[in-house]
Image (tube, grey):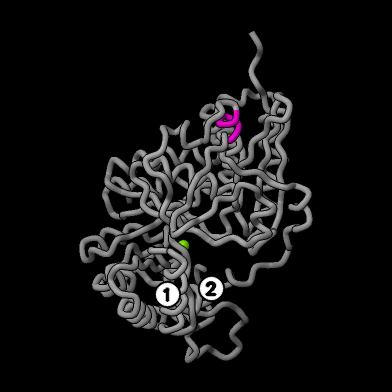
Amino acid sequence: MTGPVTITDVETILTQPGQSRLVIVKVQTSEPGLYGLGCATFTQRVFAVEAAIERHLKPFLIGRDVDRIEEIWQMSMVHGYWRNGPVLNNAISGVDQALWDVKGKRAGMPVYQLLGGKSREAAAVYVHANGESPQEVADSAQCLVDEGYRHVRIQMGGYGGTASAMQRPQGSPAGNYFDPRAYGRAMLEMIAHVRETLGAEIELLHDVHERLSPIDAVQFAKDVETYRLFFLEDVLAPEDIEWFRTIRHQSATPLAMGELFNNPLEWRPLINERLIDFVRMHVSQMGGITPAIKVTALADTFGVRTAWHGPSDTSPVGHAANLHLDVWAPNFGIQEWYQPSEIEYEVFPGLPHVVDGYMYPTDQPGLGIDIDEGLATKFPCDEIVEQWTQTRRPDGSPARP
Ligand code: MG
């Protein structure tokens, strides 16, 4: 009897072929030519994740049996004693997704087959419309509808909007300013206009991005109810989740939450008390496919659907992982999608395509995605200090981005 296939190396690949800095993990195995890829992208702290993988996870993983995904995940999570932080969760996800990729390749099956097979042929996706005025947003959304999308997220002036009349104190520092209450008023006007322009059939979504105070979030969820959103996203910050009970009792606006969550203690009460309608964690931020399967099953029990985080700071490998979860999950709701550039398709062969608002999986074994490492090295990650996350309220005080 031959011995197990083991992990022989864990490589960290940093690349930025598009807008976001990406972290990809490549797990090499003792079987010649057999490797797996995983997403470990925490775009604001890529070098910390790289160190966590190279200095801590890699020495711990070399020689382990690639088949034992669950045991490796559990031990990786407790091995550092302190757990459920974004850097280590992303590092663990890179390995976890890569091991699912390896298992699929060994079985000759796509990962969705290992999960239990397809519940649907393709995943419905939503994409982002933006503009500086309600009419610009409506025009942007109409273009996406013309491309075949039936679900569109509508934002005006980026997260928090643009409040040109804002009065700041003298000497205010530079930063990304927004006025929460002006934002709330402007978004209501915009959402009303887009609903009126596009009609009732197109599904509209909006991301508050934690920009409102809790009581203003309650009022906003009530005010937008009449426009029948598909969901309202991150209407509260993780620090304010107890306020979901208040919103739930006063509004039937569907609620989506979770892209900042790291810890089961954050999503568990929202699911168990049926306080939200969609869980939308960043799968690598939770620790990969292994915990995502468990969250999906828990949410299904309570009538909550999935809507995994999927903008450009989820890597193409992460999008492939999302897609396998999406086509399998009985309680799949919707998938966020970011419309990658041609160069991203070149760096990541197998990056899924969307046709008429649906993302289709292939029947390739594993995650079905690869990386052209030679090309990836031509796009090194920049080392700038991020500006858009230096966010401030009108009086200059720091705010959540
Ligand atoms: Mg969001």
Who is closer to the viewer here, 232 or 237? 232
Task: Specify the principal SS of the magenta part.
Answer: helix
Q: Can residue 286 be seen here?
A: no
> In 3D space, how far apart are the residues under numbered discs 2 and 1 (Cα atoms)?
35 Å
Q: Position of residue 98 (x, y in %)?
A: 61, 37
Who is closer to the viewer here, 190 or 142? 142
Q: Position of residue 346 (x, y in %)?
A: 68, 54
Q: Can residue 116 be seen here?
A: yes
In the rendered image, the residue lying farthest to the top is: 1
In the rendered image, the residue lying farthest to the left is: 249
Q: Residue at x 25, y 63 (%)?
A: 246
Which of the two labelled residues, at mark 2 and mark 1, occupies the earlier sequence position? 1
Left or right: residue 370 compared with residue 123: right
| Few, some or many residues within 10 Å of mark 1 (<14, 14–19, 20+) | some
Numbered tag placed on residue 142 in the rendering: 1
Count of numbered marks: 2
Mark 2, residue position:
398
| Tag 1 secondary structure | helix
| Image: magenta residue range | 101-105
**Residue 325 is drawn in which quadrant?**
top left
